[in-house]
Image: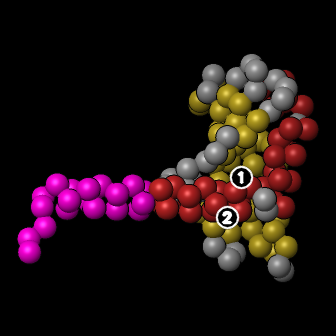
């Protein structure tokens, strides 16, 4: 017995909803996992206590969800990690770039820079 076209469209529609919802859920879990790493929290602590960053962004400084699809700026392997974290404050917003390396099983922030939306041609060095 043949299946109606409308039934096939419903199955395809629900399949699409399930696949996209699963992808969205897994991506958010991965982002939350990264946000719970010690080096991520330490990098944000350094930003929030940096005098220049506080002066330009204002307080409180909030981090936003980064995009895992931006593989040029957001990646991690067993030895190195790099992230571009959107940040904002009451005065300005921008992107916080961190470079991290695994040194003898301990992750160390090698470099961190803040790029402000109001000054896209310059970066404020947070960690050298």
The quadrant of the image that shows the N terminus is: bottom left
| Residue in the foreground of this view, choosing between 8 and 41 | 8
Residue farthest to the front? 1
- Residue range in magenta is 1-20
The secondary structure that dominates the magenta segment is helix
Q: Does residue 49 show up?
A: yes
Q: What percent of the width, then of the height, locates residue 21? A: 47, 56
Q: Quadrant of residue 55?
A: top right
Q: Is residue 6 above or below residue 124?
A: below
Residue 108 as seen in the image, left or right of residue 5: right
Residue 72 as seen in the image, left or right of residue 126: left
35 within the magenta span: no
Tell me the element at label 2: strand
Q: Is residue 51 above or below residue 108?
A: above
Residue pointed to by mark 1: 98
Q: Which residue corresponds to the image point at 69% horizontal and 75% vertical from the top-left?
A: 79
Q: What percent of the width, then of the height, locates residue 75? A: 59, 63
Label 1, residues with CA under 10 Å away: few <14, some 14-19, many ≥20:
many
| Residue in the foreground of this view, choosing between 76 and 4 | 4
Give yes or no for contact between labels 2 and 1 (Cβ–Cβ under 8 Å).
Answer: yes
Q: Which residue corresponds to the image point at 82% horizontal and 65% vertical from the top-left?
A: 108
Residue pointed to by mark 2: 81
Q: What percent of the width, then of the height, locates residue 48? A: 86, 38
């Amino acid at each position: 017995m043949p299946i109606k076209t409308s039934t096939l469209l419903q199955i395809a529609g629900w399949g699409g909803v399930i696949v996209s919802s699963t992808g969205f859920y897994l991506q958010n879990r991965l982002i939350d996992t990264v946000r719970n790493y010690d080096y991520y929290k330490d990098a944000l602590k350094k930003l929030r206590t940096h005098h220049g960053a506080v002066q330009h962004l204002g307080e409180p400084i909030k981090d936003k969800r980064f995009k895992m699809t931006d593989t040029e700026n957001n990646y991690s392997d067993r030895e190195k990690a790099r992230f571009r974290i959107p940040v904002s404050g009451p005065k300005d917003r921008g992107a916080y770039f961190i470079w991290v390396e695994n040194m003898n099983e301990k992750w160390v922030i090698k470099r961190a820079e803040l790029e402000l939306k109001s000054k896209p041609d310059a970066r404020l060095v947070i960690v050298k």
